[in-house]
Amino acid sequence: PAFIATFVLCAGLILLSFYTGLRNYSDQVAEVQMTKSLNREALAETTSYRDVGGKGIQATKPARPMGILVSGLENSLGRHTTITMHSNPSMSGSKVEGNPIFALFGNLDLMFIVKTVLSLLAILFTYDAISGDKEDGTLRLTLSHAVPRDTLILGKMIGGLLCLMIPLSVPVLFGVAM
């Protein structure tokens, strides 16, 4: 039951992260195109270079295709700046400025799922791998046979690793195929 619950949870979160990553990427592509068209219109209306240097030109970071998987620092640093003749450009439009919850948790992306959700699930799977067997008496029964302790511990580690890698890899492969 724990494996099935983990698989369903990971599949749901990973597919949701792929969906939100694709939506964010398409929004970023549209935003870059909008900034380019607004800059073209503003440059067509100006008559001198002094006007361009005074008002400035808007610049937006281009959308990164790998941003579908991991957003990185874009939400913390911002994506927009105005380049003028009289000031240094600085990035603005950070999601952290508007909502401090983003500073704590970040986006729902593959990195968040691996570092937070899978680490908690690893603790769930391994917290009683040896001590639970000791309490149930199955450890004594297992060690009464000719099973070396290092083989038992290695088997527990490989079993825990497989219980985490299968729920991670299958939805990632399915999401990449989509």
Image (cartoon, rainbow, N blue to C red):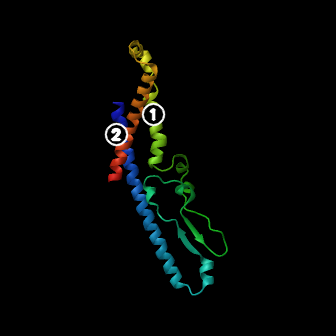
Residue 60 locus on image (x, y percent): 52, 67
Instruction: Kindly identify which residue carries mark 2.
Output: 8
Q: Nearer the viewer, residue 28 or 162?
A: 162
Q: Residues within 10 Å of mark 1 (few under 14, many from 20)?
A: some
Whether residue 24 is situated above or below residue 154 in the rendered picture:
below
Disc 2 element: helix
Residue that appears at 54% across and 46% down: 104
Residue 88 locus on image (x, y percent): 65, 69
Disc 1 element: helix
Residue that appears at 42% across and 34% down: 161
In the picture, the quarter occupied by the N terminus is top left
Residue 159 locus on image (x, y percent): 39, 30
> Of all residues shown, which one is farthest toward the bottom?
47
Residue that appears at 43% across and 16% down: 135
Q: Nearer the viewer, residue 100 or 132?
A: 132
Q: Is residue 99 visible in this depiction of the protein?
A: yes
**Number of marks drawn:** 2
Residue that appears at 59% across and 80% down: 52
Quadrant for residue 47, please give it: bottom right
Upstream in the sequence, badge 2 or badge 1? 2
Q: Residues within 10 Å of mark 2 (few under 14, many from 20)?
A: some
**Amino acid at pointer 2:** Val
Whether residue 31 is situated above or below residue 177 in the rendered picture:
below
Instruction: Kindly identify which residue carries mark 1.
Output: 122
In the picture, the quarter occupied by the C terminus is bottom left
The answer to whether 71 appears left or right of 83 in the picture is left
Q: Are marks 2 and 1 in contact (CB under 8 Å)?
A: no
**Amino acid at pointer 1:** Ala
